[in-house]
Amino acid sequence: MKTKRILPPTYLLLSIATMVLLHFLLPVSKITPYPWNLLGVLLLIIGGSLNLIADAAFKREQTTVKPFEKSTALVVSGVFMISRHPMYLGMVIILLGIAMLMGTLTPLIVVLIFGILMEFIFIKTEERMLEEQFGETWVAYKKKVRKWV
């Protein structure tokens, strides 16, 4: 029987819900006043765009977007020239945008925790799998492109 894993979008949604709760229940300090907090919309657009562009690249190469599934192609062009993991980066940017819109300190804690969780739950395993699958091609790519940015 195949074990169902919680996928990154679920972590993203749980993080957003936690940020909203923290913002209203424990705002701590207002750090981004109006109208500066509206720059969070720009971050939402950038983060969402990164995710959509990366997803389209996976589809174009006909390889899986799902973590822990075997890739059939190594995508190294487009947004993958900026970050080895643009979808996780996009999700972090989305969370930063939401935190900026809220303007309080506590939601930023969730952004940090989300990034750490993605690193240890997904990225480490994905990178090991990619190295096993693509060998020297992966190693060369890894030397040229940073993990996050």
Image: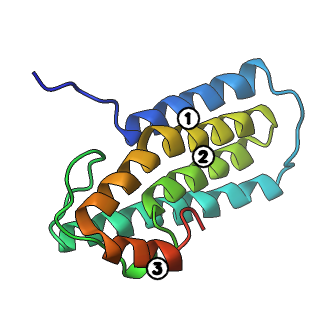
* Residue beneath the point at 64% across and 31% down: 19
Give the structural element (helix, strand or loop) at label 3: helix
Observer able to see residue 65:
yes
Q: CA distance from mark 2 to mark 1?
A: 7 Å
> Label 1: which residue?
16
Residues 146 and 44: in front is 146
Observer able to see residue 80:
no
Tell me where residue 78 sits by quadrant. bottom left
Q: Residues within 10 Å of mark 1 (few under 14, many from 20)?
A: some
Farthest-out residue, left: 1
* Residue beneath the point at 60% across and 46% down: 95
The percent coordinates of residue 137 (x first, y second) are 32, 77
The percent coordinates of residue 6 (x first, y second) are 34, 30
Quadrant of the image containing the C terminus: bottom right
Q: CA distance from mark 1 to mark 3?
A: 28 Å
The percent coordinates of residue 49 (x first, y second) are 45, 66
Give the structural element (helix, strand or loop) at label 1: helix
* Cβ atoms under marks 2 and 1 closer than 8 Å: yes
> Label 3: which residue?
81
